[in-house]
Image: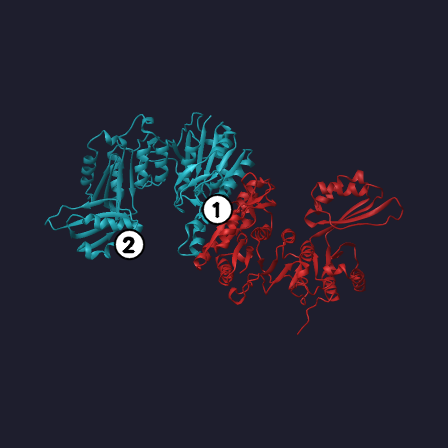
Chain colours: A red, B cyan
Amino acid sequence: MALIVMKFGGTSVADMDRIRNVAQHVKREVTAGNKVAVVVSAMAGRTNELISWVNDATETPDPKEYDAVVSSGEQVTSGLLALCLQNEGVEARSWHGWQIPLETDDAHSKARITDIKGESLKSSVENGTVAVIAGFQGISPDGRIATLGRGGSDTSAVAIAAALDADLCDIYTDVDGVYTTDPRIVSKAQRLEKVSYEEMLEMASSGAKVLQTRSVELAMTKNVRLAVRSSFDDPASVPAVNLDGNSTIGTLVCNEDEIVEQQVVSGIAYAKDEAKVTLINVADEPGVAAKVFGPLAEANINVDMIVQNVSADGATTDMTFTVPEDDLARAISVLETRKDELRYEELKGATDIVKVSVIGVGMRSHAGVAANMFKELADKGINIQAITTSEIKISILIDAAYQELAVRTLHSLFGLDQETA
Amino acid sequence: MALIVMKFGGTSVADMDRIRNVAQHVKREVTAGNKVAVVVSAMAGRTNELISWVNDATETPDPKEYDAVVSSGEQVTSGLLALCLQNEGVEARSWHGWQIPLETDDAHSKARITDIKGESLKSSVENGTVAVIAGFQGISPDGRIATLGRGGSDTSAVAIAAALDADLCDIYTDVDGVYTTDPRIVSKAQRLEKVSYEEMLEMASSGAKVLQTRSVELAMTKNVRLAVRSSFDDPASVPAVNLDGNSTIGTLVCNEDEIVEQQVVSGIAYAKDEAKVTLINVADEPGVAAKVFGPLAEANINVDMIVQNVSADGATTDMTFTVPEDDLARAISVLETRKDELRYEELKGATDIVKVSVIGVGMRSHAGVAANMFKELADKGINIQAITTSEIKISILIDAAYQELAVRTLHSLFGLDQETA
């Protein structure tokens, strides 16, 4: 017998038919002898409707009231799924965040989980009652409902799995696993059977949308084995989770040492939602970087890649960096108000760029990945505008026009193309 | 300064424009120096949508899950109104039933309030923060959300008013007060400035829909002064509640001794949703009434008026009684399965009847009301099929075709017609 957490997102519970389908997935696991806690999102579109009302009420919503309104969507889904399960003869009850309680800090609308006092939840699940938990929400120190921010239901699921000491946290979504790259761009992309936490983390923060970065971080910290699989499979045709907590379908996100044959490169990710800012002929003197990036940090703008050219004349230089596309206008306005202090000649913003990342824990022990990568792209005539690296990732910034070519080229280069039978 | 509770029903908070209108009503009271707690229903139509999903999930919903789903509508409204108030510069926060906590018994979906631990609510209101309370809901002994049944928000409001020791509980609705009878039937109907709890209770249980019977009962028990007024009045043109807790508009429901000039009859109510059951030639012997009404009570069917004819032959009699129209089919089926035991000749059900009630505390001291009433109706050729009375009410059952004629006749007879200027 395994204790598993199953998480279903908004498209998986979009209407009563989809909720009934979810009930079948859950029933399959219960019938196989597994103990189950389910974490659900709001029905697709519901949260956006609630947010639109909030924004209609006021331009500067109190985050506590925002949370009180927006959290209701998940409560509705959890009750409806509990009812559908009961209708199938499966014992079930709904749990709201405050009933568990799932405790958070007081950063309403983007709260972090501080503790889960899950004793009664755990004993209920262990006694065979399916727990249907409203995701995305907890209770703040002053007893108000707090939400975990967009995608928070993934984080709820992982935290619940850790609190219940679950054997597996199964994230059901609208794709059937994690791929070597986006299958819409590279038809030869392969589903990964296993991927390490570190790689998944780099993929998520490099543009892969299948899992929230926060939830992967938490899974890694808490050592929660995570699986990604599709809720659109026919519930009856899919095997249940093994009694030792292993799933035979989807992608398992786990510790490196669970992965026997490790590739050098596991995946190619890309992010189109970055923008490039260039300061031309800025003074090349100590402290200039602090003068540029300090105000941006204060304005809560995340700077990602930074390139500073070697100064030709020793007096001025060009500085290039990337920010989220949504923050570009704000970043430019912050820097324009400081033009006198920074003494740059020109300030340019551009959105026609893309970040492409090559990710793999095997890079640690294999030299030459970067060299191969740069040579191959040069052969294809692709100019690299900026580079950042981590121990297991190389990211480059290129002209958006070359995005598909670059992704396909690197996917082939690192041996990720699916072999045709 | 007065502490007041303001309650707004579903049509008063049907959309964002209506919620903003409610915020103006509340702001008027705050500006006038009153301390305010607001109780809100779900946006009109919302609860029905939630119930339709529940019924789609299962034919026999678990009342605990029903409550978890259905209570979400009021939570949304309370958050949105708090935001609209904040947007107007009025300090406000939302309260869910479990946050107060408003404690109930475990009769989910029709729970009764057992206690309100309102200390933090009260100190928050007294410190000048408007409390926007989700009506219709509380928390059951095992920590689940419990709803109070249809119309429960009126009951919430009265219970909150009692817990806060409020000077006035203002029920805002879609009519501007309590009338001597339905103005759609009698154009000369007058708005009552004051009406006693006892009269209001009889009116509510005799078909007047302006207030829930339960909420009036509770107001009488807890001595909560209740006002009924319209949320559709222009918030700016309406005077605020006096600082001694009196409203100059709408109808005040209060203790008899607050009413100086008491009419003999205060109002005429009617109920069309009753049905008549007649047992013809049933055995006239001891215990037959118990045999008829025992099984109906077991089936949870409320019997209202009962008439048993004097037996002509000493062996059999006809028995007539009324039940809610919705329960007629069930009542007939219950009695048909017991035909052998009851030995009646024929069983008839009819829905073409109406109950008309004359209500007034003045009846206690004025004899002859019933006699006048019966004579006047006889003069108009209206046949009375059954009669029940209480200390302050006389109800008659008549053919539905005569409903309007009877109501108008009695309204004139007891001097309730509005004088034209």
Please tell me the numbered disc located at residue B47: none
In the image, what residue type sits under mark 2? Answer: Ala
Look at mark 1 in the image and give the residue it sits on.
Answer: B72
Numbered label attached to residue B329: 2
| Mark 1 residue type | Ser
Foreground residue, B192 or B365? B365
- Label 2: chain? B
Residue B298 vs residue A372, the one in the foreground:
B298
Q: Residue furthest bottom?
A: A421
Q: Is residue A326 left or right of residue A368?
A: left
Instruction: Decide if residue A133 is on the left or right side of residue A251.
Output: left
Q: Position of residue A52 (x, y in %)?
A: 56, 46
- Does residue A153 appear left or right of residue A410 in this picture? left
Look at the image and tell me whether residue B210 can be seen.
no
Q: Is residue A386 above or below residue B356?
A: below
The answer for how far apart the CA atoms under marks 1 and 2 are is 33 Å
Instruction: Tell me if B149 is positioned left or right of A263 in this view.
Output: left
Label 2 element class: helix
Earlier-in-chain disc, 1 versus 2: 1
Farthest right residue in view = A313
Q: Is residue B194 visible?
A: yes
**Quarter of the rendering occupied by the C terminus of chain A:** bottom right
Q: Position of residue A142 (x, y in %)?
A: 55, 38
Q: Chain of mark 1?
A: B
Looking at the image, which residue is at 19% across and 38% down? B374
How many discs mark residues in the rendered view? Answer: 2
Tell me where residue A293 appears, x and y as whole percent.
76, 43
Q: Position of residue B35 (x, y in %)?
A: 48, 30
